[in-house]
Image (tube, rainbow, N blue to C red):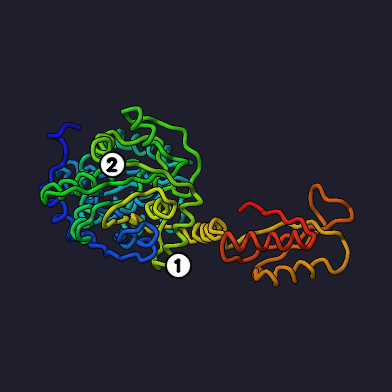
Amino acid sequence: MTHADLPSLEEFEEAARDLERVIERTPIQPSQHLSEVLGVEVSLKLENLQRTGSFKIRGATHRLSRLTAEERERGVVAASAGNHAQGVALAAQQLGIPATIYMPLGVPVPKLLATRGYGAEVVLEGATVDVSLALAASHAERTGAVLIHPFDHRDIVVGQGTLGLEVFDEVPGVETIVMGIGGGGLIAGVAAAAKAKAAAEGREVRIVGVQAENAAAYPVSLEAGEPTTITTEPTIADGIHVARPGAVPFEIIRDLVDEVVTVSDDDIARALLSLLERAKQVVEPAGAVGVAAILAGKVRATGPTAVILSGGNIDPLLLQRVVSHGLAAAGRYMTIRIPLPDRPGQLVQVSELLAQAGANVIEVLHTRHGQGMQISEVVLQISVETRGEEHRALVLEALRAGGFRPEIVPD
């Protein structure tokens, strides 16, 4: 993207004015915990509280508002497993545009119901979002509907960039802004808007992007100098599970984003748990990667820092699993497997050792069935609460000192 093609500050400001009747101006919340971890003042931009539960309504509304009357008559089509679907559906409802959304089979029920609730026609087809996107593209060719891409369009980038203006205005003297990257629409818009705003005030702002390490297409693409398709692995951060950067956002990110780091699923689970306990915020995994990067020591900052919590649409069942995983990753929960001789009193001894070590028992399974067991053996599988990594190590050592052979069962 040439300098002339880069969205201007005036474009972002005009888009922000146009969006006022549709979006919420989401709050900023100081984080004492993250400030202590990073060593500078950290604030959270609560875009998880946005209408439809994520920032996607910004780009979708701006994109649809710029359609011609003839394009609006033809309707729009999109593909998404959640946030983009809801954003397009609500934007289309607000503007009176017919909308068809392709969603993959197995999409979480709350996201499906919300998308339908905004008035869109939902087509459930395809095993993945990529398949749904191909079906949406075919629908566009067949019917003439306008395909609304989730990130690879200039109008989408400008709409998302309005979030950067809010952060810049609401965090006095902000020097660093941290957020997740999927296809790149959000960070491209925020980087362009915030850096233009900073330049107008004669100062600078750093932009740090965060990807899930199992779907980190940007480090590879930036090194190659062009969008590159990677082979992804499963990640809990499904909202940023993208195998190839968008062509439009890539050009901006290459020139304006200062650093891209990656985090593991364990890092993300810990971040979700921290946000629940300390900030009292329900955030989806993709929306928490900025916090994950700070907690994992991946972010450097020298002044006021803002972290964008980009979405809060998490399925309750996934939240339950993620909380358990986060507790385990933080050393506060573990399940251990202990082979025992099949004679009376063994369970009592284990219980006494756990009590002496201060571990709280949550669940117990005592069985004679299992692979690799001797006829004279039983297996005790027990889940306990612990107070962190050091306490967990002490509990295991207490069991070993008592003559037992505990093994941690992977979460």
The image's mark for residue 362 is none
Mark 2 → mark 1, Cα distance in angstroms? 31 Å
The mark tally for this picture is 2
Q: Residue at x 44, y 45 (%)?
A: 104
Q: In the figure, is residue 185 to the left or right of 135?
A: left
Position of the N terminus by quadrant: top left
Would residue 55 be visible to someone looking at this image? yes
Q: What element carries label 1?
A: helix
The image's mark for residue 277 is 1
Q: What residue type is labelled 2?
A: Asp
Residue 180, percent from left and from top = 35, 48
Q: Is mark 2 on a helix, strand or loop?
A: loop
Q: Name the residue under label 2.
A: 258
Q: Is residue 132 above or below residue 120?
A: above
How many other residues sit within 10 Å of disc 1, few (<14), some (14-19) or many (≥20)? few
Q: Residue at x 65, y 62 (%)?
A: 394
Of 348 and 212, nearer the camera is 348
> Which one is earlier in the sequence, the residue at label 2 or at label 1?
2
Residue 274, percent from left and from top = 45, 62
Of 343 and 304, nearer the camera is 304
Q: Which residue is drawn at 42% across and 51% down?
A: 297
Q: In the figure, is residue 187 to the left or right of 344?
A: left
Q: In the figure, is residue 34 to the left or right of 397?
A: left
Residue 366, percent from left and from top = 77, 62
Q: Which amino acid does label 1 sit on?
A: Glu
The answer to which quarter of the image holds residue 40 is bottom left
